[in-house]
Image: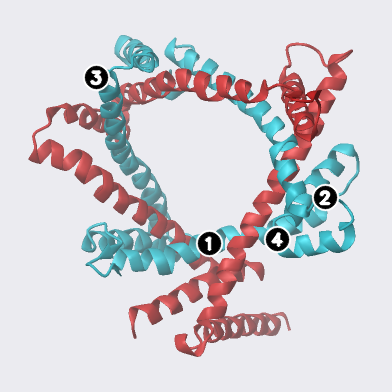
Amino acid sequence: MFLRQYVPMAIAFVIGVAFAVQYYVPHPASEGLLTTVNDWLIVVSGFSMVLGLASLMGSHWAKVRRAVPGWGYSLVVFLGILGTLAVGIVSKGKMFAGEGLTLTALGWVYDNMLVPLQGTVFSLLAFFMASATFRTFRARNLEAGLLLTAAFLVMLGHVPLGEYIWDKLLGFLPSKADQVMGWIMNVPNMAAKRGILLGVGLGAIATSLKIIFGIERAYMGEGG
Amino acid sequence: MSPELLGAWVAAGLTLAIFSFLYRDNPFFKFGEHLYIGISVGYSLTLLIFNFMIPKWWTPLFREGRMSLLVPTVLGLLIWTRFFPRFSWLSRWAFAFIVGFGAGITIPRMISNFIFRQVESTAVPLVSRGPGGVSFGWEDLSNFLIAFGVLSVLTYFFFSVEHKGPIRPLARAGVLFLMVSFGASFGYTVMARVSLLFGRMYDLVEYSSRGYGYATLILLGIMVAVFSAQALSKRREGE
């Protein structure tokens, strides 16, 4: 009980209070301590990545071992991880080599595999968002109407075609499409964002205090 | 085949494989999806090893003898006790350190950067004072709307009092501000995705040129042929 519960709570309390106070101590030693512990946590995150990697590889290895339908795709995951890692080791983690900044093998994988895959996966969302918009965006009440209008105006203000349409239909108005979009982003959108951010800030402070004083112990997992 | 040409073929093939999901879930897409996961993990791991673990841990600890780095080493090894259920409770010490540090640095920074800065930017004069006296222009109206919007949104999220009486219209105004904000964020996100889509389409068009061996057209043709063959064989099975 002591080692399993009280020691972690004491560690969280001491470290939490120390680094909350550290912010108000403008001394090089205090700044140095923060930098050192930040570097420590990067090292710890490196160790913890092994945990995540083991979990991912374990679940895919189980699929291969049991030969579940689609197990071949799990081999593709292994191929991707080990292949990129091997290429990264050969390239010594560098994207460019030499004076002429020629691409290394890792840079080649990044430019010709990772960037196209990532860009395409995220651009697929444009189609699904368009489809969802078509199905659900109906101005049934004032709230939905405002949401629809704001989204439409922001989209119009972003592209030359939108500006062209605005000029043709609403050219008599003193403001252009990009000015209207800017006003929406900087005034009503900003007001709501600030309200949300204030709430987030207060919530984060309350949660941090709960962690430091041992009220919130979810990080201990089961039995915490 | 030059690396550039090979890169064009690979990039075009992977882009088309992911876009093939627009037709339906298929082996090309699944291959691309799983390869994306693998390459992302492998790339993150490579960056972690060469940009952080070697310069910030291995070299200082084992080459320069900086013993203070034994602390994160022990914390990291404690996290690895999760692999052994009997000792996994020891990982709590490492998590307590990480969570305690996060909580500690959050409090003053949230107060300073979120609370004070947001309030400071909101609490600005609502009228302008110039040589001609006090005036109320477009900018002042915007400042007033921001202040009113922040107050009404906070009222909407304040659940300790029931939203009735004079609170009700204020909370309702908060909802309207939130809807405009959600709409604006939605529009912004859609446009960001569309710009990514343009980027991918631009590359596909470029790779369909003669200089790249008509990579896009040939790979697209192969995919269409495979899908057509699949559809035909399914129809025959149905008959």
Alpha carbon of mark 1 to alpha carbon of mark 4: how far? 20 Å
The residue at which mark 4 appears reads as: A159
The residue at the point 16 percent across, 27 percent down is B68
- x, y percent for residue A193: 66, 32
Three-letter residue code for mark 4: Val
The residue at which mark 3 appears reads as: A29
The colour of chain B is red
Three-letter residue code for mark 1: Gly
Alpha carbon of mark 1 to alpha carbon of mark 3: how far? 44 Å
The residue at the point 77 percent across, 26 percent down is B144
Tell which circle, 1 or 4, labels the residue nearer the N-terminal end.
1
Element type at mark 2:
loop
Quarter assignment of residue B198: bottom right
The residue at which mark 1 appears reads as: A119
Q: Are marks 3 and 4 in contact (CB under 8 Å)?
A: no
Q: Is residue B86 above or below residue B165?
A: below
Tell which circle, 3 or 4, labels the residue nearer the N-terminal end.
3
User: Do the residues marked 3 and 4 share a common chain?
Assistant: yes
The residue at which mark 2 appears reads as: A137
Q: Are marks 1 and 3 in contact (CB under 8 Å)?
A: no
A13 horizontally vs A205: left or right: left
Return the chain for callout 1: A
> Which chain did the image draw in cyan?
A
